[in-house]
Structures are given as C-alpha cells and as structure tokens.
Image: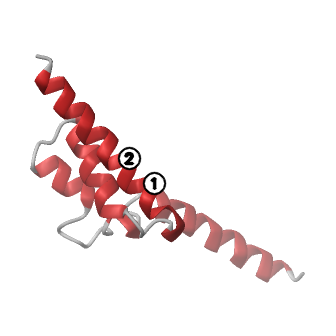
Amino acid sequence: MPKIIMLLKMFKSKIMDKEMVNHPSHYGGKDNPYEVIKVIENWNLDFHLGNTVKYISRAGKKDTDKELQDLKKAMFYLERKINNLENK
C-alpha cells in the first residue's frame, strides 16, 4: 500500500476517534444548540436525570441495533432517581 494512502487512513481514523469523543453526532454535534451535554448542563440535571436524557436522545442513533438497550438504560436511571426520591 502506498505510504500516502496509509497516512490518509491514519488521519481519517484520528478524526473519527476525536468526533466520537468531542461532540459526537449521536448526541447532536457541536453546532447543535440542543446537543445533549449542553441541555444537561443548562438544565442543571443531576447524574440520574442527565443520563436519562442522554440515553433517550441517543436511542437508535449511536447504534441502531441497540435502541431498545438505550431506552432500558434511560429507564434504569429514571427509576433510580424516583426510588431515591421516594426513600428520602
């Protein structure tokens, strides 16, 4: 494989890795005013509610085969929040 092609593939891989960490599209992306992290921070959501919003917003977007799993994770965090409030 020519060296330039190898370099281009490495560069593309680095860009993809960064996009999966900084403002990934399945959470809305950097330019979206409703990017999940922005909503969580602006609404001052705690850990449980923040994760609930996160998993609902990404359901079926990060991995289409795991939509149900994401929704169950959202429910897990919401139920924990409710249980914590009920047991105060």
Q: In which quarter of the image is residue 14?
A: bottom right
Residue at left 26%, top 32%?
80
Residue situated furthest right in the rendering: 1
Disc 1 and disc 2: Cα gap in Å?
6 Å
Looking at the rendered structure, the kind of residue marked 1 is Gln
The N terminus sits in image quarter: bottom right
Residue at horizontal 84 percent and vertical 78 percent from the top:
3
Residue drawn at (87%, 83%) of the image: 2
Between 87 and 50, which is closer to the camera in this rendering?
Answer: 87
Q: Residue 59 occupies which quadrant of the picture?
A: bottom left
Q: Residue at 78% across / 81% down in the picture?
A: 4
Position above or below: 86 against 23: above
Q: Are marks 1 and 2 in contact (CB under 8 Å)?
A: yes
Label 2 neighbour load within 10 Å: few <14, some 14-19, many 20+: some
- The disc at residue 69 is 1
Tally of marks: 2
Q: What element carries label 1?
A: helix
Q: Is residue 40 left or right of residue 58?
A: left
Pick the front one: 79 or 61: 79
Dot 2 falls on a residue whose secondary structure is: helix
Q: In which quarter of the image is the C terminus?
A: top left
Tag 1: Cα neighbours inside 10 Å, few (<14), some, or many (≥20)? some
| Residue type, numbered disc 2 | Lys
Residue occupied by mark 2 = 73
Q: Mark number for residue 18?
A: none
Residue 21 placed where, x, y %?
A: 46, 56
